[in-house]
Image (cartoon, grey):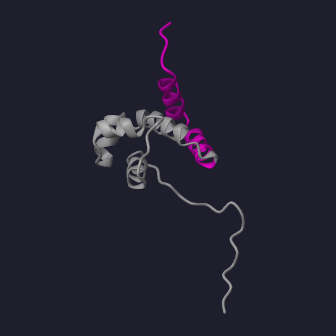
Amino acid sequence: MKSRSHDDAMAELYRDDPAFALEVINDVLEDGDQAELLILLRQLAQVSGGVQAVAEQAHLNPTQLYRTLSPKGNPALSSLLAILKAMGLRLAVQAVKPVPETIEP
């Protein structure tokens, strides 16, 4: 039996269960672990045709994207948004507790 990388196995899992992939990415975003987020985005890039395809769709240099999605990467918000858009995703903000009403004078 041929072994495969963890990234390949996770990419297959996310491809087979997109709802699970969204749950995982939201959990990672909630935890705030940047390295884990970048690993997850690299795995999701495989689902979206590979890093080369995502780089083309995001209008980014493929070499830069590989570095950006490394565990030590530090993407600018504009790059992160472009990467997510290329994968058919978007970043959204959601209240974790009720937002206080604005007090008018």
Residue 4 placement (x, y as % from top left):
48, 16
Q: Indicate left or right for 9 with 24 as reference.
A: left
Q: Is residue 59 magenta?
A: no
Using the rendered image of the protein, determine whether residue 49 is visible from the camera's viewpoint: no
Q: Quadrant of residue 104?
A: bottom right
Quadrant into which the C terminus falls: bottom right
Q: Quadrant of residue 93?
A: bottom right
Residue 17 placement (x, y as % from top left):
56, 36
* Residue shown at 63% from the left, 49% from the top: 30
Secondary structure mostly seen in the magenta stretch: helix
Question: Magenta residues, as a range?
Answer: 1-30
Residue 66 placement (x, y as % from top left):
36, 35
- From what the image shows, is residue 3 above or below residue 22? above
- From what the image shows, is residue 4 above or below residue 55? above
* Residue shown at 30% from the left, 45% from the top: 60
Q: Indicate left or right for 19 with 80 as reference.
A: right
